[in-house]
Image (cartoon, coloured by chain):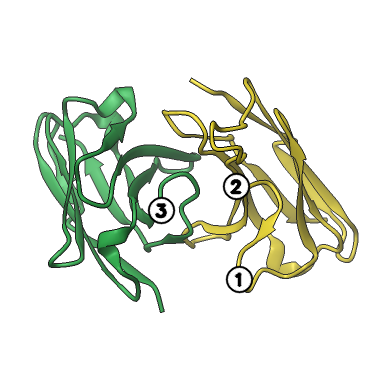
Chain colours: A green, B yellow
Amino acid sequence: EVQLVESGGGLVQPGGSLRLSCAVSGFTFSTYWMTWVRQAPGKGLEWVVNIGPDGSEKYSVDSVRGRFTISRDNAKSSLYLQMNSLRAEDTAVYYCAKGARAPDSWGQGTLVTVSS
Amino acid sequence: DVVMTQSPLSLPVTLGQPASISCRSSQSLVYSDGNTYLSWFQQRPGQSPRRLIHRVSNWDSGVPDRFSGSGSGTDFTLNISRVEAEDVGVYYCMQGSHWPLTFGGGTKVEIK
C-alpha cells in the first residue's frame, strides 16, 4: 500500500523558514517524480514544485522560485521542502504526492501558517 | 501559463441523476509524446485529493465506473452517470502537459 506522510508544518512569522518532510512507503521511491501541491484555506489546489527521480530536474511555480527548495533522499525514501522568506500568502495545507504530470497518490497534508 | 477553466462552480444534483463538469484549457494539452495529460481529482470534505481519471479517460484503481472522462485538445468533461451521496465534494481538473502545472478552480458537487 502506497503511503505518504507529511510533517513539519506549523506557525511561523513572516520572513521565517520551515522545512517540510514527506516519508513514503509502498513503492520504489527512487524511480518516481515527486510533487508538492498546496491549498490555501477554503481555496483550490495549487501546484508548487516537482523533482525528478535522481533530484537533478526540478520545476517550480514562479511565486516560490528562489524561496522554496525541493530535495529528496532516496536512501531514506523521503521528500523535503525547504521554505524560506515565508509570506502570509504561503499559508496553506501542503501535500506531497507521487508522480509529476498526474500525481496518483497524496498524503494527508501538513498545515503551514505564516502570521505574526 | 495554461489557464484551466472549470464550469459550473457549483453543481446541485439529485441522487441517482447524472452530472457533468466541463474543463477547458487555454491551449492544447497534447504533449510531445502524444499523450494528453489531463487528470480529474475528487476532494471529499476534510480529505486529501484523490485522482479519479488520468490522461483524459483512464480510470484509477477502485474508481467506480459511474465516473468517466472524455475530451481532447482543449475541451474535457467529467461525467458521473448516477450521482451517489459519497460523490459530494469538490472536483478539480489538472493539466500536466505544460510547466507550470495548473489546476482548474474546482466544481463543488452537492446533493439537492
Kind of residue sitting beneath label 2:
Ser
Image mark for residue B61: 1
Viewer-proximal residue, B36 or B88? B36
Protein chain holding label 1:
B
Q: Residues within 10 Å of mark 2 (few under 14, many from 20)?
A: many
Furthest residue toward bottom: A1
Evaluate if marks 1 and 3 touch, with contact meaning CB atoms under 8 Å apart.
no
Q: Rounded to the nearest whole Å, what is the CA distance between mark 3 and mark 2?
A: 12 Å
Kind of residue sitting beneath label 1:
Ser
Identify the mark nearer the N-term, 1 or 2: 2
Image mark for residue A99: 3
Q: Rounded to the nearest whole Å, what is the CA distance between mark 1 and mark 3?
A: 16 Å
Protein chain holding label 3:
A
Q: Position of residue A67 (x, y in %)?
A: 16, 29
Q: Position of residue B32 (x, y in %)?
A: 54, 31
Q: Residues within 10 Å of mark 3 (few under 14, many from 20)?
A: some
Viewer-proximal residue, B110 or A44? A44
Question: Which image quadrant is residue A78 in?
Answer: bottom left
Left or right placement of residue B25 versus residue B15 in this view: left
Q: Position of residue A35 (x, y in %)?
A: 34, 48
> For mark 2, what is the residue?
B39
